[in-house]
Amino acid sequence: MKDEKRILNIFDWTKMNKIPFALAILAIIIFSACSDRTEKKSTSEDEGKTCIEKIMEADAEAGQIRNHACETQSLSAAIHTYVKTLKELDFGDCPPVFDKAFNKHIADWEAIVEISDKYPDLRGEMHDLFKELEQSPDQEEFKKRVDKMWASWKEVEQQIQ
């Protein structure tokens, strides 16, 4: 009987030292709060990756269209359509640094149009037209703008890694 009472006393909350119990409860609460934050951060990172993946897929698709659209329309028109498509994408869930880098890249494409507008009758696959423009009277300025566009693309790619 004495042993039974002693066992029951172990579970008697009124006789228990409450400090270790309170510390254990506090540790559980803190762990839960940290766990929620980690989970939210992970979800946010996942959303960012999903957004980046969507943007990159849309860019690849629009880029393929752009590359061949200038076979039947001006290079400037093809670039305008490409840029318009990219500007309509939702960057809302993307990391701000990715959004900033990508929008700079879009602006660099727009700057190329100032040169391509001078050659409205050129037709062909985009890369072939770029080679022609690199031999044009505007070659220096064209090359600068294309180099700037490729540099901004590298910035976009750095944000992916």
Image (tube, rainbow, N blue to C red):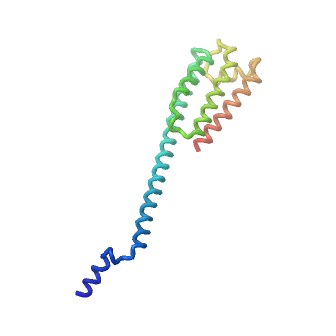
Quarter of the image containing the N terminus?
A: bottom left
Residue at position x 50%, y 38% from top?
A: 93
**Which quarter of the picture shows residue 31?**
bottom left
Horizontally, residue 12 falls left or right of residue 21, namely left
Can you tell which quarter of the image residue 155 is in? top right
Q: Position of residue 161 (x, y in %)?
A: 59, 44
Which residue is at 25% across, 83% downward?
A: 4
Farthest residue to the top: give it: 121
Q: Residue at x 62, y 23 (%)?
A: 126
In the image, residue 95 lies at what x, y percent? 55, 40
Residue in the image at 39% along x and 73% along y: 18
Vertical comparison of 43 with 61: above or below:
below
Residues 147 and 1: in front is: 1
Answer with the quarter of the image where residue 33 lies: bottom left
In the picture as drawn, the residue positioned furthest to the bottom comes out as 2
Give the side of residue 139 with respect to residue 128, left or right. Answer: right
- Tell me residue 125's x, y (percent): 61, 21
Q: Is residue 124 above or below residue 59?
A: above
Q: Nearer the viewer, residue 12 or 41?
A: 12
Count of marks placed on residues: 0
Name the residue furthest front.
14
Q: Nearer the viewer, residue 108 or 40?
A: 40
Q: Is residue 121 above or below residue 111?
A: above
Residue 38 image offset from top left, x and y in percent: 48, 53
User: Looking at the image, which is closer to me, 35 or 141?
Assistant: 35
